[in-house]
Amino acid sequence: MAEKRDYYEVLGVDKNATEDEIKKAYRKTAKQYHPDLHPGDKEAEEKFKEANEAYEVLSDAEKKARYDRFGHAGVDPNYGAGQGGYGGFNGQGFDFDLGDIFSNIFGGGFGGGASNPNAPQRGSDTQASVTISFEEAAKGCEREVESSRIEVCDECHGSGAAAGTSPKTCPECNGRGQVTTSQRTPFGMFQTQKACSRCGGKGTIIDNPCKKCRGAGRVRRPAKITVKIPAGIDDRQIINARGQGNKGVNGGPAGDLRVAVNVRPHPIFERDGYNVWVEMHISYAAAALGCELQVPTLDGKVKYNIPAGTQSGDVFKLKGRGIQSLNNRGRGDQLVRVVVDVPRELNAEQKRLLMELDKALGNETAHLGRGEEEKKGFFGKKRK
């Protein structure tokens, strides 16, 4: 397998490029190698895929940071560095975040017995990101998202004790998880409750902890989750995959997976709300006489008749050819901006014919074609 090229080199930008510069470079590269412009060209197809892969990493702040630090290994899910960065503990085939686990178990601290540490607690949310194409955002799709979440340890089934053993009742609190202290004051005897310091409020003690989770009862694992992305989603919007986050504690519900959606810019289309803009270049003759255009849309190419006398900058509307609304109330429109291409270089015969046309239209032709001669004459006088 050929070695991957540097992503910055693929898009032709340096490491200090801004988000807008990266997006602009991607649009230029994608347009240059788009399969629609190079049908059957395998080399162009590979370069287009390479540009998509580079943009998917460099447009995502978290992936870009890992790539800048570790290179391709930092964004390869099959490589160790790509799975790191969770701020947790690594070793012996398990990966979990002690802060996450104990904050969920103990509710963030020991205080006054205001909360029951053995009560069901919802798991925390997790985050992930996915990059999709312009067309996928417009029409909706399903994508497999790679994430990492805390789950019940399958070795001890959440008890935290090694196989063949079980937690025992804490002798300090007799399994209540809380201890009561009495204090005599001038106003009488006061009693206060607090979490048991010996068992941490759980009411049980583990003498022989599970080797896989080290007594925590939970482990962090990588997960692949299929997420349904609705039609009409826009760049940087968040979707929730309910119940796909960290598992709850003491029978509590799982948290959600929050997925940030990154949409690759399109080399031809430009989004404006639920409308889509596209520029179509036509010749001077086509603008004057009218013509039939093959206009690219999200549903494929459609025919559109440009009327005679069309001016550069005129805009035509293709009703209902835009992006699906998120609330499923129809689609936006496609707006076609016409750009009339004026020829830059003409031979003598072409110039003569244009002057004859201008004269036939009743325009003054004496000044036509003199701009370049006058420019040369001016500089000629200066030189003389």
Image (cartoon, grey):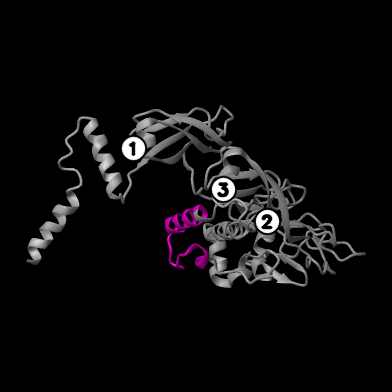
Quarter of the image with the C terminus in it: bottom left
Q: Residues within 10 Å of mark 1 (few under 14, many from 20)?
A: some
> Which residue is located at x 32 percent, y 44 percent?
342
Q: Secondary structure at mark 1?
A: loop
Give the labeled residue for mark 1. Answer: 312
Q: Is residue 270 left or right of residue 249?
A: left
Looking at the image, is mark 2 or mark 1 earlier in the sequence?
2
Rounded to the nearest angstrom, the CA distance separating label 1 from label 3 is: 25 Å
How would you classify the magenta stretch by its main secondary structure?
A: helix
Residue 105 position, x and y percent, is 70, 56
Looking at the image, is mark 1 or mark 3 earlier in the sequence?
3
Looking at the image, is mark 2 or mark 3 earlier in the sequence?
3
Q: Tell me, yes or no, whether the two marked residues, 2 and 3, touch with CB atoms within 8 Å.
A: no
Mark drawn on residue 147: 2
Q: Tell me, yes or no, whether the two marked residues, 2 and 1, touch with CB atoms within 8 Å.
A: no
Nearer-the-camera pick, 40 or 343: 343
Nearer-the-camera pick, 55 or 239: 55
Q: What residue type is disc 1 on?
A: Ser
Nearer-the-camera pick, 82 or 6: 6
Q: Is residue 148 above or below residue 333?
A: below
Q: Which residues are magenta?
A: 8-31
Q: What residue type is disc 2 on?
A: Ser
